[in-house]
Image (cartoon, coloured by chain):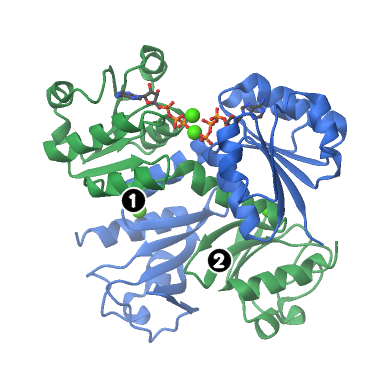
Chain colours: A blue, B green
Amino acid sequence: MKKEFVVIGLGRFGGSICKALIEQGMEVLVIDRDEARIDEFASIATHAVIADSTDETVLKSLGIRNFDHVIVAIGADIQASILTTLMLKEIGVKRVTAKAQNDYHAKVLHKIGADNVVHPERDMGKRIAHNIVSKSILDYIELSDKYSIVEIASNDLLAGNTILDLNIRAKYGITIVAIRRGASVIVSPQAHNVIERDDVLIVIGEIENINRFEKDLLLDK
Amino acid sequence: MKKEFVVIGLGRFGGSICKALIEQGMEVLVIDRDEARIDEFASIATHAVIADSTDETVLKSLGIRNFDHVIVAIGADIQASILTTLMLKEIGVKRVTAKAQNDYHAKVLHKIGADNVVHPERDMGKRIAHNIVSKSILDYIELSDKYSIVEIASNDLLAGNTILDLNIRAKYGITIVAIRRGASVIVSPQAHNVIERDDVLIVIGEIENINRFEKDLLLDK
Ligand SMILES: Nc1ncnc2c1ncn2[C@@H]1O[C@H](COP(=O)(O)OP(=O)(O)OP(=O)(O)O)[C@@H](O)[C@H]1O
Ligand SMILES: Nc1ncnc2c1ncn2[C@@H]1O[C@H](COP(=O)(O)OP(=O)(O)OP(=O)(O)O)[C@@H](O)[C@H]1O
Ligand SMILES: [Ca+2]
Ligand SMILES: [Ca+2]
Ligand SMILES: [Ca+2]
Ligand SMILES: [Ca+2]
């Protein structure tokens, strides 16, 4: 059973969602009031329609109620974003994800029934600031306020040592759950595994402890 | 030694980077040609300057060469983004991160010396599409083309079973590296650990295998 999605607004964010959904085998109807955007996506999306989403007749005639999930990716025109979201929920669309420009916009979207409100630029800004500050941390998942999983780049200080030599679990209370080495991944590495210069360590633990480990790592540089 | 950053362009992306860097204790000079943006960030950033970053005299008079890292977060005005990045590298700024609007823009930024090119809307679109399609996958790190770490929401099918009962490693070739339970995290759970309804499993393995596990999970729903 293929899921059917609608993406309204083909900016960079909406466009990227459409492409990713199509790549995952979903059906995607895209709507934009800008003809040029629709032309670009005509050959990518399952269906592409030039329309103003604030026009309720249009939404109804497209049978929007029958789709599984609608993503409102309208940007600068906050009024259109709010009006569209409101009508989608009134028409009875089950899941609506809407993009917010700021906290006030987000609040209104929640109030009028958006099931999920996203802040792509803000969230990616945070991620990138995080990566910029800590040069050795490449990517991460925040598991809780206290715990994270992070990717840490190896360096000359680590290279050539076994996991036993480094004694990271005892010294820092963190665990190496995997090592990425080129295209391959070593899951649950053993005490005798030797770390190489270009490895990436996947580490889980308390954020404080990970930061302590990372600081000691950088003494090398 | 506090690091010193410059953020040029205070859209949602640049603004978010500035705030996150300040929260991490960094010093941040922000530049925008729009007075309203600078007014908003005057009390947030370390220094805030109304200026056009394509004016080389301005950049030099701000002593931009002495900062550790400059982030060019200019959006729609691709020409200004390119010109600014070019001048920053010519002046001798060591690290420049620039935001790209599309692949062509990214290529040019790399060519003229940007050390790091980012696509916030595109990348967040991918992440969110991923989360939308798989309701049980909450967050993830792509370790390679083949391997991922993902957060998977538990459900009624899993609840009450021990890790041994589920036999996930043997059946799917994937490993539960941690369980998030409310605010706490159980690292390297043991065979006898019982999974609860609202747990989040942190799982590592081949993407194909994780997808297979996730599909079987959803049979429940
Ligand atoms: N009422 C509407 N009906 C249909 N499409 C709309 C409507 N309002 C805006 N759009 C479309 O939404 C798209 C995204 O809007 P805009 O460019 O303002 O967002 P943005 O936040 O700058 O995008 P991004 O940052 O993702 O590139 C545009 O292609 C625009 O034509
Ligand atoms: N030459 C320049 N000098 C200084 N600031 C500039 C220059 N050109 C653009 N800016 C500023 O960059 C900021 C971001 O630009 P814009 O709003 O086009 O980006 P955007 O990609 O839509 O932003 P976002 O999606 O992050 O909200 C604006 O506040 C704008 O005033
Ligand atoms: Ca990093
Ligand atoms: Ca914009
Ligand atoms: Ca944007
Ligand atoms: Ca999800």
Residue B167 in the image: above or below residue A135: below
**Spot occupied by residue A167 in the image (x, y as percentages of width and height):** 36, 75
* Residue B137 left/right relative to A164: right
Q: Residue A12, labelled with which disc?
A: none
What's the chain of the residue with tag 2?
Answer: B
Tag nearer the camera, 1 or 2 = 2
Quarter holding the N terminus of chain B? top left
Amino acid type, residue under disc 2 in the picture: Ile
Instruction: Pick the residue in front: B165 or A36.
Output: A36
Name the secondary structure under disc 1.
loop
Residue A191 in the image: above or below residue B19: below
Q: Residue at x 38, y 32 (%)?
A: B18
The image quadrant of residue A94 is top right
**Spot occupied by residue B160 in the image (x, y as percentages of width and height):** 82, 69
Q: Are marks 1 and 2 in contact (CB under 8 Å)?
A: no
Name the secondary structure under disc 2.
strand
Residue A77 in the image: above or below residue A32: above
What's the chain of the residue with tag 1?
Answer: A
* Residue A164 left/right relative to A6: left
Q: Residue A134, labelled with which disc?
A: 1
Amino acid type, residue under disc 1 in the picture: Ser
Whether disc 1's CB lies below 8 Å from ligand 3 is answered: yes
Q: Which residue is mark 2?
A: B149
Q: Residue at x 30, y 56 (%)?
A: A215
The image quadrant of residue A21 is bottom right
**Spot occupied by residue B34 in the image (x, y as percentages of width and height):** 36, 16
Q: Residue at x 16, y 24 (%)?
A: B62
Q: Residue at x 37, y 62 (%)?
A: A152
